[in-house]
Amino acid sequence: MTNDTTAAVAEFLRTEMARHHIPGLSLAVVRQGKPVLLQGYGWANLEWQIPATPTTVYEIASITKLFTATAIMRLVESGRISLGDTLGKHLPHMPEAWHHVTVKQMLMHQSGIKSYTDVPRYWETTRHDLSREEILDLVRALPLSFAPGARSAYENTAYYLLGFLLEQISGQAYADFLRTHFFTPLGMRDTRANDYAAVVPRRAAGYSWRDGQWVNKPYYSTSGTYAAGILLSTVVDLAHWDAAVRRHAILSPQTHALMLTPHPSQAQNERQFDYWHGLGWFLLTHNEHPFAGHNGGIQGFAGSYVHFLQRDLTIILLHNQDNAIPPHEIALAVADFYLPSAPELSSHAPS
């Protein structure tokens, strides 16, 4: 990477941030497990004019699902759970209609369970700290949208339930498991479960752009996120995570490859949206370059984590505005500064 590339990326990002009213943004570009660019742009806090840096802490929302999926696969590797295990086997108190949903189907968004975030009443509760069982009560009595495995539909309830499953099998709280097995060993000092009462050094303020001005994000209870989206992190920490994933310090090469293997639903309705699901990952292509990734979006924040499978190139982008363009569009545009025009063949490419 040259200084010219760094300058071109900075110019591009500042233009996009101005165009889409993004106050602050942090970026990591990781190649072959090593950061080649760690940079902040704009403001982490508008009121105090605090600059965004690579160690600014953001809410990463659904990027959390990558950690939840990896934690479940750690239990699979240890033999404590199987991908074919049903929810009813481990959580028999859950609704009978959910009992035959498998762990694998939950990881792939093929459970058929309604997403609690799609229930209109949920959005009346987001400012209230409900129990996890109260969150599930929003969908507990609803019928399945389809038979498990029949179709694919992105939803949050399955990942919420994977948090219950992780706690039941491991005997640890969700946040404790991630800290013990991932964050502490990997030196991810700024990654943790969100707690609005906690004093978090370098925490970014979250914003929306409304009626021609920035406004502070409203309170959004963490009871509505849990294993589907509760984590805080930085691009530095996520770069550490990415390097550890690629060198197989977290999961075996075989398990890692399984997570990046397309697992189509019976209807293969994912095809109409030009993606497949792996186990936790979305599998797509950009200009013929296969990549695995996941976005995150929550009130006040958005982010994208994109890994190009054939190029060992990762783009991690976090920012503090919730109604800009989809974050992966910016991440993929950044990737274009680093990708060659002609991709190589790879066994990881979705078919």
Image (cartoon, rainbow, N blue to C red):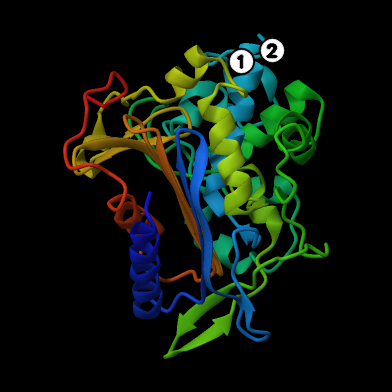
Q: Is residue 280 above or below residue 317?
A: above
Disc 2 crowd, CA 10 A, few/some/many (<14, 14-19, 20+): few
Please tell me in which quadrant of the rendered image residue 162 appears.
top right
- Residue 82 coordinates in the image, percent (x, y): 58, 13
Q: Is residue 41 above or below residue 80?
A: below
**Count of numbered marks:** 2
Q: Which mark is residue 80?
A: 2
Disc 1 crowd, CA 10 A, few/some/many (<14, 14-19, 20+): some
Q: Residue at x 52, y 38 (%)?
A: 34
Which amino acid is tagged 1?
Val
Q: Is residue 337 left or right of residue 86?
A: left
Q: Is residue 146 left or right of residue 69?
A: left
Disc 1 target residue: 76
Q: Which mark is residue 245?
A: none
Q: Residue at x 82, y 25 (%)?
A: 171
- Residue 188 coordinates in the image, percent (x, y): 70, 43
Mark 1 lies on a secondary structure that is helix
Please tell me in which quadrant of the rendered image residue 73 appears.
top right
- Residue 351 coordinates in the image, percent (x, y): 22, 24
- Residue 325 coordinates in the image, percent (x, y): 35, 66
Q: Are marks 2 and 1 in contact (CB under 8 Å)?
A: yes
Q: Is residue 23 above or below residue 54?
A: below
Residue 66 appears in the figure: yes
Q: Residue at x 34, y 58 (%)?
A: 5
